[in-house]
Amino acid sequence: MECRPSCGACCIAPSISSAIPGMPLGKKAGERCIQLDSQNRCMIFGQAERPAVCASLKPNAEMCGASNTQAFIWLTQLEQSTSPD
């Protein structure tokens, strides 16, 4: 499955605890990754400095749903269910 153009949900909804170029402490859930361009594409896709967690996340029908809204809902629920708080 390919990423939905202009989605970016997986780069906004979940928290990332590892360093991202420009975000040395990672990012909070719901925070837009600094590496997303204006069309919600990862500017470090395929590069060594891209966090391993990002590289391991693969689009799939359950996660991405049929719309960006569905993707945000699913990823937000996943974030909440796996958060230590």
Image (spheres, helix red, strand yellow):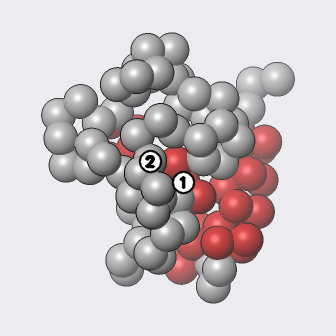
| Place of residue 83 in the rendered image (x, y in percent of width and height, measured from the top left) | 73, 32
Q: Is label 2 or label 1 in front?
A: 2
Compared to residue 20, the image places residue 35 above or below, namely below
Residue 20, quarter of the rendered image: top left
- Quadrant of image for the N terminus: bottom left
Instruction: Name the residue located 65 percent from the left edge and 37 percent from the top edge.
Output: 31
Looking at the image, which residue is at 29% across and 36% down?
50
Give the distance between the C-alpha atoms of the residues marked 2 and 1, in whole angstroms: 11 Å
Labelled pair 2, 1 in contact (Cβ < 8 Å): no
Q: Amino acid at mark 2?
A: Leu
Q: Which residue is mark 2?
A: 36
* Residue corresponding to mark 1: 10
Q: Quadrant of residue 73?
A: bottom right
Residue 72 vs 15, above or below: the answer is below
Looking at marks 2 and 1 on the same chain, the residue that comes earlier in the sequence is marked by 1
Quadrant of the snapshot with the C terminus: top right
Query: Quick one: 82 or 67, which is closer to the camera?
Result: 67
Please indicate whether residue 11 sits to the left or right of residue 65 in the image.
left
Q: Give the amino acid at mark 1.
A: Cys
User: Where's residue 37, x and y in %?
Assistant: 42, 51
- Can the viewer see residue 62 in this picture? no
Q: Residues within 10 Å of mark 2 (few under 14, many from 20)?
A: some
**Which residue is at a point 65% across and 48% down the rendered structure image?**
13
- Residue drawn where x is 52% and y is 48% of the image: 11
Taking the image as drawn, is residue 53 in sight?
Answer: yes
